Image (cartoon, grey):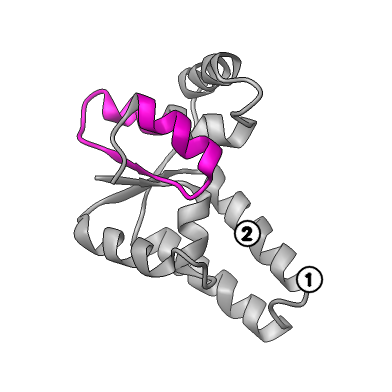
Amino acid sequence: MLYLDSSALIALILEQPWTEEVLRLVGQHPECITLDIAYAEVGSALARARWEDRLDEEGYILAVEQLDQIWLENLNILPNSVACSKMALKLAAAHAPHLRGMDSLHLAAALEQHRTLAVGFLTYDERLKSIAEALMPLP
């Protein structure tokens, strides 16, 4: 199983330097998961790309449609929980100032799943990656 944070998910929609690697890794894993907050994070990145004119209006609409399709058809969505939020707080405190709020939630959700399942954590945020490497497997 592969956990995708928002930096990995956005590469499925907008070309990133790591898009080919994400596509390869997603293709190698029959199940991909993410936390429900990723929809808002990726949607925000798409809106920012539109505002910065990296996407025109038609491109933005198509990108949101692609996000919806990926969300509905290719991901198992984990709901945020109080337990996940509490673990995220502990992670943020232990790794301050390097671990930001949403990143701590992604890592906490992946760690919760990793307790009972073999889960790899895919991120392209270097700060988050360095912390995650010490706590769970990366692909």
* Cα distance in 3D space between marks 1 and 2: 14 Å
Q: Is residue 55 left or right of residue 17?
A: right
- Image spot of residue 137 (x, y percent): 28, 35
Q: Residue at x 44, y 59 (%)?
A: 71
Residue at 42 percent across and 64 percent down: it is: 70
Q: Position of residue 88 (x, y in %)?
A: 53, 22
Q: Position of residue 51 (x, y in %)?
A: 79, 70
**Closer to the camera, 20 or 58?**
20
Q: Which residues are magenta?
A: 109-134
Q: Nearer the viewer, residue 120 or 86?
A: 120
- What is the number of the mark on residue 25? none
Which quarter of the picture shows residue 93? top right
Image vertical order of residue 121 relative to residue 70, above or below = above
Q: Which residue in the protein does label 2 denote?
A: 43
Q: In the depicted view, which residue is nearer to us: 31 or 103?
A: 103
User: Which quadrant holds residue 54?
Assistant: bottom right
Label 1 environment density (alpha carbons within 10 Å; few <14, some 14–19, many ≥20): few
Amino acid on which the number 1 mark rests in the picture? Glu
First reached walking from the N terminus: tag 1 or tag 2: 2
Residue 101 drawn above or below residue 65: above
Is the Cβ of the residue at disc 1 closer than 8 Å to that at disc 2? no
How many callouts does the rendering have?
2
- Residue found 46% across the figure and 34% down from its top: 130
Q: Give the residue pinned by disc 1.
A: 52
Three-letter amino acid code at the position of disc 2: Gly
Residue 63 within the segment the image draws in magenta: no
Viewer-closest of 55 and 124:
124
Element under label 2? Answer: helix
